[in-house]
Amino acid sequence: MDDDELTRAFAALADPTRRDLVSRLALGDAAVGDLAAPYDMSLQAVSKHIAVLERAGLVTRSRDAQRRPVRLDAEALGELTGWIDRHRRAAEARMSRLEDVLADPVTAPPATPTHTPSEEDQP
């Protein structure tokens, strides 16, 4: 997945309605009318949300006689998950290296000295 595809996918998932649609589609394919049922919005508005998900490559529509079921693209979600996991692993490795450095007294940065009063500080 290139940067433009990632941008479109994350932008599509930024909307809570579209995230909910993805969650519902993870359970199985559904017609737009079925997907629209729980929302307090028009069928046209839900269709627009689905179109955004489709342009982002997260869902596809097929033709099944008179129905046009919407299907979640598991491969696209896998690519997003892979991208997130790579960055999570890199961050965890960086934190692990930091913890190792801080745990080793030889390589740990020196403690900040505390100020001890001197004769000049006395009144």
Image (spheres, grey):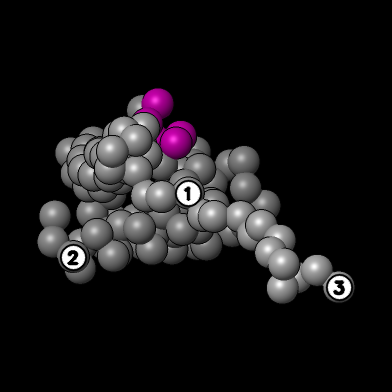
Q: Which residues are magenta?
A: 23-27
Q: Is residue 31 left or right of residue 91?
A: right
Depth order, front residue of 97/67: 97
Q: Earlier in the sequence, mark 3 or mark 1?
A: 1
- Look at label 3 and name its amino acid: Pro
Relative to residue 94, is residue 6 depicted above or below? Answer: below
Residue 47 lies, in percent from the top left, at 44, 58
Q: Secondary structure at mark 1?
A: loop
> On the image, which quarter does residue 54 sit in?
bottom left
- Look at label 1 and name its amino acid: Ala
Q: Residues within 10 Å of mark 1 (few under 14, many from 20)?
A: few
Relative to residue 56, is residue 96 depicted above or below? Answer: above
Q: Earlier in the sequence, mark 2 or mark 1?
A: 2
Depth order, front residue of 96/3: 96
Give the main secondary structure, helix, strand or loop, of the magenta stretch.
helix
Residue 97 lies, in percent from the top left, at 26, 39
> On the image, which quarter does residue 79 sit in?
top left
Q: Secondary structure at mark 3?
A: loop
Badges 3 and 1: C-beta atoms under 8 Å apart?
Answer: no
Q: Residues within 10 Å of mark 2 (few under 14, many from 20)?
A: few
Q: Is residue 4 left or right of residue 96?
A: left
Q: Is residue 24 magenta?
A: yes
- Look at label 2 and name its amino acid: Asp
Q: Earlier in the sequence, mark 3 or mark 2?
A: 2
Relative to residue 8, is residue 79 depicted above or below? Answer: above
The residue where tag 3 is placed is 123
- Residue 37 visible in image: yes
Alpha carbon distance from label 3 to label 2: 65 Å
| Disc ID at residue 3 | 2
In the picture, which quadrant includes the C terminus?
A: bottom right
Residue 77 lies, in percent from the top left, at 26, 41
